[in-house]
Image: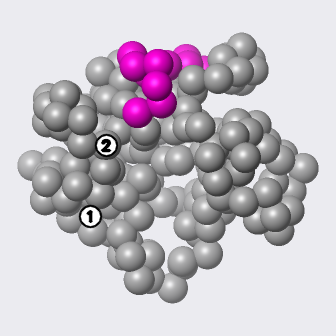
Amino acid sequence: MTNSPITGLILAGGRGRRMGGIDKGLTLFNETALIDHAIATLDPQVSELLISANRNIEQYRGRGYPVLTDEQADFPGPLAGIHRGLERAKHDLVVVIPCDTPKLSATFVSRLLEVMPKDGAACIAYDGVRDQHLVCLLRRSVSDSLDQTLREQNYRVSDWIQSLDPVRCDFSGQAEMFLNINQLSASQL
């Protein structure tokens, strides 16, 4: 674990629409469940780890970390999981990752921390081509802003993150780190 007081939040609560409705976190990538890849990457970099999941709760709890479920039952998207994580986090800084990015580096959190201004609300990863809104470092204080966004039923992650005026952490040249497993064929790479 890192010495920095940071909460890690793994988002594993989606519908898995692009994968035929299967629970992506439990999908195998190189013979290991995606959630286990995410835990192995994030746990050494944070001092608290939370998992956001809405199905197969006992399988996620079996990993030994607190599992948070969305307050709404209709899968409102990753913002609902982020909101629960921000509410539950013990620390001021919360790093968020989706469960389906198994190639994140073992040092990406320290890179986000280096770039995050002392008074900044958010820092997002940039892969050299586009912003990776779900690989981000957030201050817990943005929870009120997110609560308002959810009440307005705006579930677009990019809209909310951009409203925070985030700084970018440039990971140009490391785009493979953001490989996103959204198809069953990709999980066999």
- Other residues around mark 2 within 10 Å, as few (<14) / some (14–19) / many (≥20): some
Is 88 a magenta residue?
no
**Spatial CA span between label 1 and label 2:** 26 Å
Magenta segment's dominant SS is loop
Residue beneath disc 1: 115
Residue 176, located in which quarter of the rendered image? bottom right
Q: Is residue 34 visible?
A: no
Residue 89, located in which quarter of the rendered image? top left
Residue at 22%, 49% (x, y): give it. Answer: 160
Q: Amino acid at mark 1?
A: Val
Between 167 and 186, the one nearer to me in the picture:
186
Q: Is residue 19 visible?
A: yes
Q: Tell me the SS state at disc 1.
A: helix
- Other residues around mark 1 within 10 Å, as few (<14) / some (14–19) / many (≥20): some
Residue at 40%, 19% (x, y): give it. Answer: 72
Q: Indicate the position of residue 166 as horizontal and vertical percent values.
A: 19, 59
Q: Indicate the position of residue 23 as horizontal and vertical percent values.
A: 70, 36
